[in-house]
Amino acid sequence: MTTASVPAEPAASGRDAHPILDLTGRRVAIGIITLLVVSAVVFVATQVLPGNAAFAVVGRGANPARLHATERQLHLDRGLLDQYWIWLSGLFTGKLGTSLANGQPVWALVKPRLINSAVLVLVTGAIGAIVGVVLGAVAALRKDSWFDHITSVTALAITSLPEFVVAIALIILLSTVVLHVLPAVSLLPPGTYAWSQPELLILPVATLVIVIVPYIFRMMRAAMIEALESDYVEMARLKGVPEWRLVLFHAVPNAMAPTIQVIGLNFLYLAGGVVVIEFVFNFPGIGQGLVFAVENRDIPVIQFIVVVLAAFYVFMNIVTDVIALLVTPRRRIAR
Amino acid sequence: MRTPRGATGLALAALVVLIAIVGPLLAAKPPDALLTIPYAKPSGQFPLGSDFLGRDVLSRVLNGGWALLIMAAVATAFGIAVGAAAGISAAYLRGRPDSFIMRTVDVILAFPQLVFALLLLSLLGPKLWLIVLAVGLTHAPAVGRVIRSATLDISERDYVKVVELQGMRPVKVMTKEILPNLISPLMVEAGLRLTYSIVIIAGLAFLGFGQAPPAANWGLMINENRSGLPLNPWAVIVPAALIALLTIGTNTFTDAIARVTIGVERRPEEAALLDELTPRQSQ
C-alpha cells in the first residue's frame, strides 16, 4: 500500500509491463462480445419473438398483400441469420432501414436526437460533477456541522425521488405556479438542435443535475473523510504542511479516485435518465424518440436506439474502470 | 426502530401505504365520473379540485396508489428471488454455471433499467404483468452480484464444510445453510430494489406505459394533468408528493437497516467502491 511512489516496477517482465493496457484490452474485448450478444438479443427479441414483426407493425387491419410487403421491407422473407447480418452491417454503414411510423430513414431521424441528447448528457455531467465534488469536499471538511447535516439529509432524500417528480417540482416552482421565468416544455420540433434555443436546456439540465449530484456528493464526502483521517494526511500534518495544502494536494486527489468512478456511473445513469426527462420537457432527444417509437411499435427505430444506449453504457463502464485505475496508483501496481 | 431516521422513513412509507390501501374505501365519489368543469379549483365539494376531464381529484388520488404498490412489491420479490437464486448458485456451484450466470448478468446490465423495460414492453404492449416481470428482471443482475460475493464468503465457512462432508446435497446446502445467512444483505437489497421498483413503475405509468386511462393512477395523473398546472396544480402536486413521500420513506428506512445490520456508515454500493475496484452498477 505504501509503494505508491515507486515509479516503474523493475521486477515486472515485459509482458506485465503495461497492466493498464492489458486490462483495458481485456475490458474492451469483453465489452465488444457483450455488445454483440446484446445486439443479437435485441434483434431476436424484436424481430422474432412476438410471432411476426410485420403483423405487429401492420396491426389489426392487416391484409395479406400489405403483410407481405412489410415482410419484404423488414427482410422477414430471409433466414434469421441473414436478417441479423443485414441489420448488424447496417449499424456500421448507416443503412438502418426506414422508420415504420413515417417512412423516414432511421439514421436521419435519430441523428439530430442523438446529438441533442449528447449535449444534454455532457452539460449535465460536467455541471453535476463540479457541484457534487465541491459540495462533498466542503461537507467532509466541516463534518458534523449544520452544513454537513443539511446537505447529507437532502442528498439522501433526493436520491430517493423519481426524476419526473423532480422535474415536475421544478416546473411548478419555476415555470407555472410559483414563478414564470422559464419555459415548461420545449417547442423545438424534432430534427432541430438544442443550442438554437439554449434556455430550453436549463430545466432539463437542472433536473438531471439535481438527480445526479447527491450520488457524487455522498461519494466525495465519504472518500474525503476517509482521506482526511488517513495516516498520510496525519503524517503530512505533523510535518507542518499547511492545512490548505493538505486538503488540495493530499486529501482531494485521493478522494477523487472513487468519486470519478461514481461520476462515470452517473453518466451511465443518464443514459436511462434522459428517457423520462426528455419526455417531460418535450426535449427532442433520443429518449423521447424511444418513447415515441415504443408507443408506435416502430421496430427499426427501437432496435437502433436501444443498441446505441447499450453501446454507450458498455463504453462508459470501460472508461470508468480504466480512469479509476489510472488515478489510483496503488491499484495499478497491485495488479 | 433503533434509529430516529429509520423510524421517520418507516412512518412516511406506512402513511402512504395506508392511504393507498384504505383509500378506495374512503373515496366519496366514483373516480371515473365526470362531475364538474375541467381543472376546477378546490372547493367544499371537491377538496382537491377536479382533473382535466372534470373528475374528482381526491377520489382519484385515493384510488390511484394500490396498483403501484402491488406491482412494485411483486416486482421486487421476483427480482430478489431470481437474483438470490442466481447469485447463490453462481457462487456455490462455480465453474460453468458461474460463468454462464455472470455473463447473462453482464448482458442484462448493458441496458439501462428503464430502457430494458421499454424494450420488453415494445414487444407485447404495456401489459401490467409484463411491466412487473420486466422491472423484476432488471433487478436480478444487481442483486445477483451482491449475493454472489456474500455467498462466496459464506460457502468457505466451517459449518458449510461440515454438512458437505456429511453428504448433504448441493440444493439443500444452498437453501438450508447458505440462504438463512444471507438475510441481512437480502433485506437491504429488498429495500433498495423496492425503492427503485416504485420509481421505475411510477415512471413507466407517467410515460403512459401502465394502467390504461381512465384508470386512476398517480403516475398517469401527473402526466394527464400537468398542462392544467396553472389552473388546478393540486391534481399534479398531490400524486407527485405521495410518490415522493413513499420513495423517501422506503429509502430512508433501508438506509437505517443497512447501517444497523451491516454496520456501515455508507450505502453498500459506495462502501464497495471505496474498498475494491470491480465493474459495478449503482442502480
Image (cartoon, coloured by chain):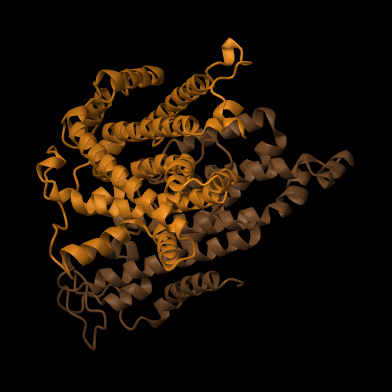
Instruction: Choose between B19 and B259: the one closer to the eye.
Output: B259
Judge left or right: residue B176 versus residue B201.
right
Chain letter tied to brown: B
Image: A22 above or below B19: above
- Residue A322: x and y, percent? 46, 29
Residue lying at the far bottom of the rendered structure: B44
Q: How many numbered dots are placed on residues in this image?
A: 0
Instruction: Choose between B125 and A20: the one closer to the eye.
Output: A20
Judge left or right: residue B201 versus residue A190.
right
Residue drawn at point x = 16 percent, y = 31 percent: A103
Q: Is residue A184 visible?
A: yes
Judge left or right: residue B18 versus residue A70.
right
Residue lying at the far top of the rendered structure: A14
- Residue A107: x and y, percent? 21, 28
Residue drawn at point x = 47 percent, y = 34 percent: A324
Identify the image quadrant of residue A122: top left
Chain A colour in the picture: orange
Instruction: Choose between B267 and A97: the one closer to the eye.
Output: B267
Residue drawn at point x = 21 percent, y = 35 percent: A115
Image: A272 above or below B254: above
Q: Is residue B269 visible?
A: no
Residue drawn at point x = 40 percent, y = 76 percent: B24
Image: B52 above or below A276: below
Identify the image quadrant of residue B102: top right
Image: A85 above or below A1: above
> The N terminus of chain B appears in which quarter of the rendering?
bottom right
- Residue A39: x and y, percent? 40, 27
Residue lying at the far right of the rendered structure: B166
- Residue A3: x and y, percent? 60, 30
